Image (cartoon, grey):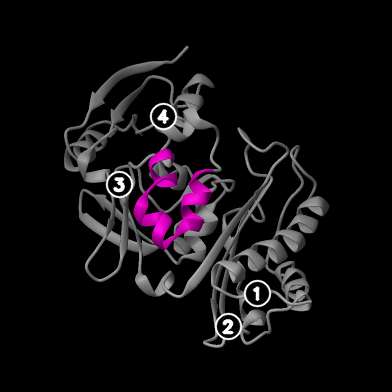
Amino acid sequence: MYDIKNVCTAGSVRDAIAALGRNQSAVLIAGGTDVLIKLRDGENAGCILVSIHRLPELDGVRLLEDGTIEIGSGRCFADLESSPVLLEHIPALAKAAGTVGGPQIRGVGTIGGNICNGAVSADTAPILLALDATLVLEGPNGKRSLPIREFYTGPGKTVRVRDEILTTIQIRPESYRGFGGEYIKFGKRAAMEIATLGCAANVKLSASKNRIEELRLAFGVAAPTPIRCPGAEAAATGQPLTEATLAELGQAALKDVKPRDSWRASRTFRLQLVRELTSRAVAGAIINAGGAVRA
């Protein structure tokens, strides 16, 4: 059923990088919820699996002294869903983690795998984009950091090279302090479902709590990669917290997205979802930021 040549259990990140370098057929595995499905379908036949499962270097959710929240790429979704740090400071990310698959998947699947497989439907990608997250990758030549918005290059494709490992995700304090966030996933079912569309909003309100000071809006399955919506974000600045504003933002977001037809949903239906979920997600973010939407 699984054509695997060998399994190498790495003792450290550097050990895993070296194992990847020694064999071009080597494939990283952590939780395995994506890798094993690909193997079952015949992809990477005869490969060597390099396991980074439960490496201490890739674990933990930490609040650093400067306020940066650092998430180990090996942290599973169930841990993120219940993380005291995320629930206190970035509950929208904890919520997004709780929408992934079912309990079994969330118990083994990792946030690093969710990002690195490049899937446009990854539930954590939109909220991390809305949080301006930074990804830290380590390879043979050391570490490099880049914004998540520069990570995705196409469907299932990223800038990560095969002998690099995503080690941590970092969210700076200026990206979550004073903001309210929301993530909404639309699917045909409430659980065990790949997103037909995912929408994340991150909102900072004016001091008087009656206008939008800053909006960050991101989508999954609305383009070939997870995306931000710069047009809608610009249109939100200074706008009052009204239902009319929400409707205008939903319309503005249509100019930022490029959904396609698929067996899950038509392009037309996804455009309808973009308009509706924008309004709902921004409204939720406004409430979570301490504001209220008026008629």
Q: Which residues are magenta?
A: 78-98
Mark 3 neighbour density, 10 Å: few (under 14) some (14–19) many (20 or more): many
Q: Residues within 10 Å of mark 1 (few under 14, many from 20)?
A: some
Confirm or deny contact between disc 2 and disc 4 (CB under 8 A). Answer: no
Circle on res. 164: 3
* C-alpha gap between disc 1 and disc 3: 44 Å
Q: Is residue 13 above or below residue 169?
A: above
Query: Could you tell which of marks 2 and 3 lies nearer the N-terminus?
Result: 3
User: Residue 293: horizontal and vertical position, in percent?
Assistant: 70, 74
In the rendering, which numbered label is found on residue 209?
2
Amino acid identity at mark 1: Ala
Residue at the far right in the pictured view: 268
Image depth: mark 2 or mark 3 in front: 2
> First in sequence: mark 2 or mark 1?
2
Mark 2 is on which residue type? Answer: Lys
Q: Which residue is mark 4?
A: 32
Q: Which residue is mark 1?
A: 292
Q: Secondary structure at mark 4?
A: loop
Determine whether the residue tagged by mark 2 lies in a helix, strand or loop. Answer: loop
N-terminal-most mark, 1 or 4? 4
How much space separates mark 2 and mark 3, taking CA atoms?
44 Å
Say few, some or many: other residues with alpha carbon within 10 Å of mark 4 (under 14 / 14 to 19 / 20 or more). Answer: some
Q: Earlier in the sequence, mark 1 or mark 3?
A: 3
Callout 2 crowding tier (Cα within 10 Å): few <14, some 14–19, many ≥20: some
Judge depth for marks 1 and 3 and give the one in front. 1
Q: Residue at the location (38% across, 50% down)?
A: 160
Q: Is residue 91 magenta?
A: yes
Q: What type is the residue that disc 4 sits on?
A: Gly
User: What is the C-alpha distance between the residues marked 1 and 4?
Assistant: 42 Å
